[in-house]
Image: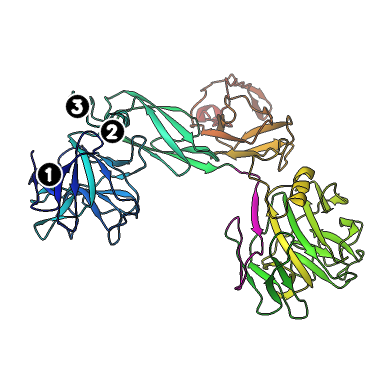
Amino acid sequence: FNGSLSAGGAAFVPGGISGGALSLSKSNNGFVDVGNVFNLGSGDFSVAAWIKMTPGDTTEASVVLSKVAAGFPNGYGLVANNSVAYGGVGKAWFFDSVFPGGEVTSTAVYQSGGSKYLYVDGAPAEAGAASHAIIANSVDFLIGGQSENGVPTGRFTGLIDDAQIYNYALASSEVGFLFQHPGQEIAPHELPPGQWRLDTVASAGGTLTRAPDLARYTTGASVTLTAVPDTGFTFAGWSGDATGTNNPITVTMTGNKTITASFQSVPMAKALAHWKFDETGGTIAHDSMGSFDGTLSPAGAAFVSGGVSSGALSLSKTSNGFVNMGNLLGLANTDFSLVAWVKMTAGDTSDAVLLAKHAAYTRNGYVLIVNSIGTRLPNNKAAFIEGGSGVAAYTPEETPYSTTSVNDGNWHQVVAVYELGGMRSIYVDGAPAEDSKLSQPFNQNSVAFLIGGVNYSGVPTGRFDGLIDEVQIYNYALASSDVDFLFQNPGQEIAPHDFPPGQWRLNTIAGAGGTITRDPDLAKYSDGATVTVTAAPNAGFTFSGWSGDATGTTNPITITMTGNKTVTAGFAEIPARILAVVNPDPKQEGQNINFDLQLISQGDVGGMNFVLHYNADYLKE
């Protein structure tokens, strides 16, 4: 399969990945024409090439190799950079008669009737998708080009080296070998034994390995699949031709199979939002941690200098100033913490709302305030309002409030910490907490989260005069050391980390056919706490066993909490069956006929029915 260099734009040069290389210029219509070969439409195949492009070259559709008639789906190709609607800038991509988008590789592995896999710089595959049937064409196989209206056309600028084509689907180990040994080939060998393909797919958040890693497997072969979560993720379960959460699993090949490993992010203790207010203009307060950007009110809100860390937010209550983030950060069913730096005019005892997700006139959401604001709370102090029921004013007996005055003309850090089913605390200028009260039932609302305001009949309204800076929201209860760190380092966040020990969650899942209970039933458990978990089958079902962070068939079980855990109870339907046929000797006592019947069950039978048949002749007597 020798190829011919184009009349211009193609030359052999030194400096390849292994020996020399092919230098191509698209502007000079450079390519190599191998002729009408390599249709590759009747089986598995793999294509590989080493490429070197100018840094930052985003030239559209730089074709590494192809056998395609441009303009409609057919053939196949290995391409760098995006075309009009496919691929990605700076990425490689592979098509097999149906043009996919997305990132692919410098090595493409195609399985007829199976999957195509995409590799860059060795294994593992960086992407995979279902294969499509190769639509044959009569154009030439080109390196560095594609056929346009039947005319070979150069479509690549840079160096190409060590292009290879194989008549089978390379295994990951072979892709790794070619990456480690440029210039060599995989030695000829018998095609992989067997007839069954195992397509494995890993969702975002992890990878999947299999042993042995073969293109095909013989009938009855066993394959071990292992799901490997990325940092910050955990394995969630199998789907397709395997189910459950056991990991690894062994698959017995009795046909073509597709198995997907799913992953989910591990809950992390982290800042959900951080508004620094360091903008120099505009109407958007940007969230440096996520996507909770806020919009400044039309008047009364501006970015100014002189914050506790760089810039700050200046608000005027008389001009109805506030920042509106929209209906978000409801913070249901979780611990949370609120952080804000404030600077008020000395002696100001007017209503002052630092931040709120609260609909006025009823008890709901949460509010961080200074002064009484229509409550019986003391002026000059910061307070954390949350929960309860009804419309009564909040009282000092139920509301944590500071001992430090914060309306003295200086900057002060105010922190509110909420523990679900625990305590609420208020901090001023670092630890320790200045007051703590029991948390109250948390009532959700659908109003906007506001900085410097509160919602009256659904209308955001400015309720603060002064400067606010470095507002942060956390999805856990800050420790005193965290509060101190933020006080000593305004402008910084607490780095994401595992939830503190002693804050473990137990997720319990009941399969079809039953329910599951736990005692005690808490949102979180302290480190070392024991929880009794009981599986209760519905009528006609029996408990079949535990999976996840518990195994076996003992019921109930006791779990010791040393980390976040998930336990699933499985149930199996009990088939109806005849347990016994008996003919007891009757005993007649007057009008009654009595007989003794005893059935002994050797296991859970899911309930019993009795069917009595009478001898009509006997009854006539």
Disc 3 residue type (three-letter): Leu
Residue 129 in the image: above or below residue 187: below
Residue 488 point in image, percent of width and height: 76, 49
- Helix, strand or loop at disc 3? loop
- Label 1–label 2 contact, CB within 8 A: no
Q: Quick one: 520 or 200, which is closer to the camera?
A: 200
Which residues are drawn in magenta?
A: 267-290
Give the image quarter of residue 153. bottom left
Name the residue rendered at 85%, 67% in the picture.
409
Query: Within the magenta stretch, is there residue 38?
Result: no
Nearest the viewer among 445 and 25 is: 25
- Name the N-terminal-most of marks 1 and 2: 1
Q: Name the residue under label 2.
A: 197
| Residue 597 in view, yes or no | yes
Classify residue 301 as left or right of residue 383. left
Q: Determine whether 493 is above or below 451 in the image.
A: above
Q: Is the magenta stretch mostly helix, strand or loop?
A: loop
284 magenta-colored: yes
Is 487 positioned to the left or the right of 70 in the image? Answer: right
Mark 3 sits on what residue? 191
